[in-house]
Image (cartoon, rainbow, N blue to C red):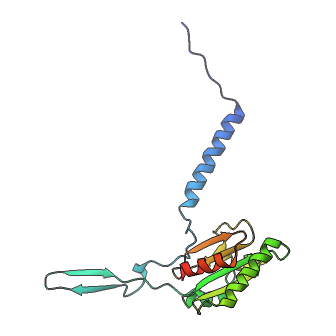
Amino acid sequence: MPSAPRIELPRPAIIAALGALILAVTFVVTKAGDTGGVIPVPSASSTPGATSTTTTPTTTVAKPAKPKQPAVEAGQGLPTAVARALNAHKVVVLFFYEPAASDDQATRAAFRAVRRVGTGGRVALFQDTVSHISNYRRLVGSLGISQSPAMVVIDRKRQAQVIQGFVDSGTNQQTLRDVV
């Protein structure tokens, strides 16, 4: 009675397949908790008086009130001036550069040009070297900044976007106009 030939996989192929499976599961599990560049805000249900009711002659409709953004506290990983700007509901721009790099110096000059033009008090501009990026880790830790220069723009809803690489002053100004 003939039997089917048995197929044996090489041990390295089995180990590679298990490794890929573990990586996929890890990605799915950790990606679910990613805030996508948004500073976490408590849910509206935890805020007292978060709903208001409107009465009509026949029905009562509950409308959820727009949740107020909680105050951001300065501390380790968030400088005081940046926390103040976020609490004042300003657009916050963080610029990180490497002092010795020519592209970084050109982008820094463009950043300073935006500062000289002015932002009408609606935008708070901050700059620092890449070596000090850990001082801002509560804001930029999950954004995946991978090169310098890098500019992080945090809008009034506290959603962040990252712009990496050389950027001229016109692009900087347009970016700020788009979020203000």
Name the residue: 66% across, 73% down. Answer: 140
Name the residue: 17% across, 85% down. Answer: 56
The residue at the far right in this view is 100
Vertically, is 171 above or below 55? Answer: above
Residue 122, how many percent across, how many down?
A: 57, 90
The residue at the far front in this view is 170
Residue 48, how many percent across, how many down?
A: 39, 87
The residue at the far bottom in this view is 121
Front residue of this view, candidates 93 and 58: 93
**Residue 96 falls in which quadrant of the image?**
bottom right
Front residue of this view, candidates 74 and 169: 169
**Residue 43 falls in which quadrant of the image?**
bottom left
Q: Is residue 129 left or right of residue 26?
A: right
Front residue of this view, candidates 66 and 101: 101
Judge whether residue 131 can be spotted in this image.
no
Q: Quadrant of the N terminus?
A: top right
Residue 147, how many percent across, how many down?
A: 74, 67
Judge whether residue 70 can be spotted in this image.
yes
The residue at the far left in this view is 58
**Residue 8 falls in which quadrant of the image?**
top right
Residue 74, how many percent across, how many down?
A: 64, 87
Vertically, is 11 above or below 128? Answer: above
Q: Is residue 164 left or right of residue 53?
A: right
Name the residue: 64% across, 42% down. Answer: 18
Q: Quadrant of the C terminus?
A: bottom right
